[in-house]
Image (cartoon, coloured by chain):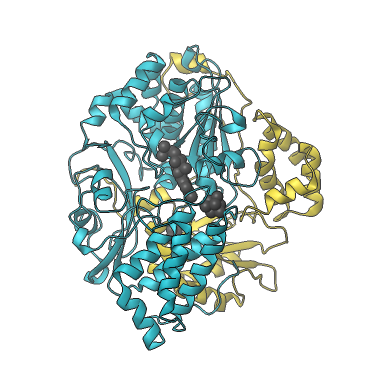
Amino acid sequence: MARLTPDNQQRARELIALYPHSRSALIPILHLLQGQDGYLSEDGMGDVAELLGLTAAEVRGTATFYDMFHLEPVGRYVVAVCTNIACMLQGAYRLLEHAEERLGVAPGGTTGDGLFTLEDAECLALCGNAPCLTVNWRFFGDVDLGRFDTLVEDLRAGRLDDEVPPHGTLSRVQRATGLQAGGEGAAGAASEGVPAALPTHLDLDTRRTTAAVASMDAGHLEGGT
Amino acid sequence: MTVTDAPRIISARLGKPRSWTLETYLADGGYRGLRAALAMTPQQIHDHVNVANILGRGGAGFEAGRKWGMLRKAEPLYLTINGDESEPATFKDHALIEGDPHQLIEGSLICAYAIGADQVFIYTRGEFPLAIERLEAALNEAYAYGAVGRNIFGSEFSIDIVVHPGAGAYICGEETAMLESLEGKRGYPRIKPPHFPAAIGLYGAPTIVNNVETVSNLPWVVLNGGEAFAALGEGRSKGTKLIALAGHVKRPGNYELEWAKVSFRDLMYDPRLGGGIRDDNELKAFIPGGVSSPWLGPEHLDVLLANDAIAAVGSMAGSGSVIPMDHTTCTVRVAWRIVRFFHRESCGQCTPCREGSGWLEKILERIENGQGRESDLDLLMDICDNISPGVTWPPAQTTICVLGPSMPPAVAAGIRTFRDEYLAHIREGRCPLPPDRLPRKLAHV
Ligand SMILES: Cc1cc2nc3c(=O)[nH]c(=O)nc-3n(C[C@H](O)[C@H](O)[C@H](O)COP(=O)(O)O)c2cc1C
Ligand code: SF4
Ligand code: FES
């Protein structure tokens, strides 16, 4: 696997159509490619270059600027432990050292079985639940050493597969309409209710810590008091 | 929750069950602001925003209405929403996108209508997949509902919104770097002038860049009027602000507070807010407006959370992230971590930023590890002076953007206020505060 699959080629063309200039679709398409293979292969990037009329150097040169893109294969789960200030103040380096010991790799390394890649991350914007980490960019907050071990067990056993898709998967919800879709515009104007036929999508409720739910958990932002 | 009885303007739905769905949003009166806006002229909305005096919530605090007024008249014209939030210890936009995407969409549409934009791009930090999923899902709902797309709610107004993911680069939060990134390039900030986005922005066209929180205020402002917004707060700081409180408090989290009515002491110690310093420790220092802002100390606890009040004591409100640190905190280590962040995130275009950040990191690391020299203190200040001549606040700039000048405050705070602590590291050959060393294995920068 390396080149974009026909399905992804099609989606890439849809992404290009969203922008006034095709090159703007480069980063979204690289996310597609990474979602397909877990990393950006040379062949895949060549494909993307062709699709956008860019040189291989332009594609590679852009991709290498961004931390989320991996140009070499990584583990099935990329565990990114935030060590930035809010997390550091709450013991993130202890957590990172524990993670190193538990997984047997230093930041940047991948376990022998190809399951885990460990990263030492910058602020993940979940600082109210420090220390925190992401697995394939899905959030886990208030992680103590015990919770870390449980998390690793759960991942190994595949118990979190619904919530943590394979590395590289960005959005599992796709845009349902083309540009300037008129749709039920008039209907919306007439009836102020929820349209009968809403596009179906993934259930986006999650048991994991989210930035919004974190506020609720702590009893914050509850009206009144 | 506010310690005054100010309404919750932007955080009303955060934490409610399924707050991100159209159903919840409509049940709470959602999209009434957009309907009201479409019944007004763009100029009327602009007037409300001018009266409301909404200072940009992305960090620079520039008046939104004034920025809109600076748009070069030309076609096409773009609106880009900055949802790249990566400033350390800032986590308010994350909550707003993930928890209330419809409010963001509605605010963006009101803004687009007011400025006459041809297309809207919401640049969302790539590491927020759940936020992106909820935003895309909300957008699908909004299209089906007729709130986005052709002839919105049966009016003459048509516009599209595109959700654009970033891919991991703090610098892409800087507005011109964001535009480069949106054009499919490396996120190198542009030189201003001439590249003020309102004149020469996305694809060279006039462009408004506004922060997620800034536009999330608009549905309320349109419904309640600019004067109701301006009745809250004091001086230049009107309305409310979502404050991200992190660090050594008992109850970290996002709190929506009326500007200029709440002091840092209230924020940190009020049982409904921060609830006090952890373990009832002593407060050593706090960072009042994101890690780029100069540090304040316990003597500043009664300063009010307001742009002018914070500026008057030599710092800034910035993006609204507050980080208290207790007496067990090593200020060398904190400065080292902040500088390390900027070193990793420097885009590398300017020598003082690219090289200076690396040197600051190395020198702070050796001081923290007990291998520093007394001359290192002057050396640190000298490097800071190269990045930002005079090491003053607001900072002088030798670089293309202000990422570079964001580094000296943390270092200067240490050397000026906690000089003895720096010297103790050097004289004792170790960090006097536990844990006494940096982690052995640090990922490669
Ligand atoms: C290094 C750097 C990083 C920035 N990061 C962000 C960010 O993540 N989000 C944001 O809204 N503004 C950020 N800004 C500020 C933007 O350049 C810009 O001022 C802001 O998005 C304008 O929106 P506003 O006027 O509504 O605040 C950053 C600025 C700099 C110099
Ligand atoms: S100051 Fe730093 S981040 Fe900003 S343009 Fe220069 S090198 Fe890049
Ligand atoms: S500092 Fe760790 S998430 Fe912000």
- Whole-percent x and y of residue A202? 56, 41
* Numbered disc total: 0
In this orientation, does residue A210 appear? yes
Q: Nearer the viewer, residue B65 or B356?
A: B356
Q: Residue at x 36, y 48 (%)?
A: B318
Identify whether B222 is placed above or below A153. above
Identify whether B161 is placed above or below A4. above
In this orientation, does residue A200 appear? no
- Left or right: A219, with B124 as reference point: left
- Whole-percent x and y of residue B29? 34, 27
Q: Nearer the viewer, residue A46 or B190?
A: B190
Identify whether A219 is placed above or below A12. below
- Give me the chain that's yellow: A
Quadrant (top left/top right/bottom left/bottom right) for the N terminus of chain B: top left
Q: Residue at x 37, y 88 (%)?
A: B428
Quadrant (top left/top right/bottom left/bottom right) for the C terminus of chain B: bottom right
Q: Quadrant of ligand 1?
A: top left
Q: Residue at x 29, y 51 (%)?
A: A220
Q: Nearer the viewer, residue B387 or A207?
A: B387
Q: Residue at x 24, y 42 (%)?
A: B259
Check the rendered structure and report the hue given to chain B: cyan
- Whole-percent x and y of residue A60? 74, 51
- Left or right: A17, with B91 as reference point: right
Q: Nearer the viewer, residue A143 or B305?
A: B305
- Whole-percent x and y of residue A61? 71, 50
- Left or right: B431, with A3 as reference point: left
